[in-house]
Image (cartoon, grey):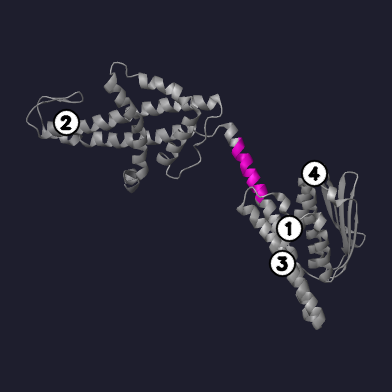
Amino acid sequence: MDRFLRPLTSATTYTRLLHLWVPMLFVSVWLFIDMSRPWVPALLLIPLGLVPAVRAGEGVQARLMLMPDGGTAVSVTRSAAWRDRLRTVLWLEARMALGAVTTLVCVWLPVLVVDLFRAAFGDAPVHDPLLTVDHPHWGYVLLVPLPLLALYAAVVGLGGLVTALARRLLGPSPGERLAALEERTEQLLERNRIARELHDSIGHALTVAVVQAGAARTARDPAFTDRALAAIEDTGRAALEDLERVLGVLREAERPASSRPALTEADRLLESARASGAEVDAEVTGPLESVPGPVSREGYRILQESLTNVLRHAGGVPVRVRVAVADGTLGLEVRNPLTATVPGPGRGSGLRGIRERAALLGGRARTGPDEGEWRVRVELPLR
């Protein structure tokens, strides 16, 4: 019983009913003007539905009044193609037709209830379009629930029908679905890029800080401890700058990507690794300034993650870094001795991020053991 009566207590039932009645206001005004041609309002809906903005307005109404969850099954954008305009015309005609049926039902069924009461308890005959009774009798009161049930079924059923038609006729077109999918893909790519940025910059800073703090604790040398604290301070300050850049992307959609660090600032990474105890042998060949911005920025992050992995998993070991710009390609290689004596956290997301960055730029990345060393080799095309 509760399930049967639930529509009566739902606000959606009455907002759908109101949505069906709205077109009847225009029809009522027209009937006062010219009752001999009731089909004119339906004819005027054809050019109205061809206006692109009408589809957006109808979509907003449908979301607010037909769907309590404000579902995205109905589009709220302007008509972009003739197919969408024709669907809007069909929707307007269907909405008016259902509105007319709803108005008739909501007027005549209550009138029938009143007539049944008159036929049951009145003294005079009843002669109305819906009921003719010459001899009133109390038994007619038993028929009163029938028009009430019909009214309930009509209101709920017509509301569900107009909602289904709205999803069908005002739903996103194939072009809109494709645009929404592309927008969603762009959002996911941006979120993935931000996650990599945070992983690389903050992960590098934390790794350096952990290594420096551990070395200072075991060294028991005040001078070394001072140097370690200074390195931690510099690395932390640089990490805060990187974090501010990433957060700036979140705050400002139009913030330029050029504010991110590039390979021309690689010295900062190398000095940070050296301060953490690694013996870094770096060699740079070719003009880094000529490397395109996107390639240079991603190369910086790849180098940062490679050095972070060395510090995290191998500690203060000799590291060879080779950066070369030649023949339309940026080559980056980081090698360090293999060791299993220094455990470190991580689940491979850093190496996966390196491969993803390379793939997005049309390059390739190879990571793994090579001749007794761990090697990261990345090649990125400059075009």
Question: What's the distance in space between the residues labelled 3 and 4, CA to CA?
Answer: 33 Å
| Callout 1 amino acid | Ser
Instruction: Using the image as rendered, state which of residue 340 and residue 61 is in the foreground.
Output: 61
- Locate residue 341, reporting x and y percent: 83, 72
SS assignment at label 1: helix
The crowding category of the residue bearing disc 1, from other C-alpha atoms within 10 Å (few below 14, some 14 to 19, many at least 20), is few
| Callout 2 amino acid | Asp
Q: Residue 373 has which mark?
A: none
Residue under label 4, please give it.
362
Residue 304 appears in the rendering: yes
Q: Are marks 4 and 1 in contact (CB under 8 Å)?
A: no
Q: Earlier in the sequence, mark 3 or mark 4?
A: 3
Residue reaching furthest to the right: 371
The image quadrant of residue 22 is top left
- Locate residue 50, reporting x and y percent: 48, 24
Question: What's the distance in space between the residues labelled 4 and 1, CA to CA?
Answer: 20 Å
Q: Earlier in the sequence, mark 1 or mark 3?
A: 3
- Locate residue 130, reporting x and y percent: 21, 25
Of circles 2 and 4, the one toward us is: 4
- Locate residue 119, reporting x and y percent: 13, 31
Q: Earlier in the sequence, mark 1 or mark 2?
A: 2
Residues rendered magenta in the picture: 178-190
| Callout 3 amino acid | Arg
In the rendered image, the vertical position of residue 205 relative to residue 34, given as above or below: below
| Callout 4 amino acid | Gly
Residue under label 3, please give it.
237
Question: What's the distance in space between the residues labelled 1 and 3, CA to CA?
Answer: 24 Å
Q: Earlier in the sequence, mark 2 or mark 4?
A: 2
Q: Residue 349 has which mark?
A: 1
Q: Earlier in the sequence, mark 2 or mark 3?
A: 2
Q: Are marks 1 and 2 in contact (CB under 8 Å)?
A: no
SS assignment at label 3: helix
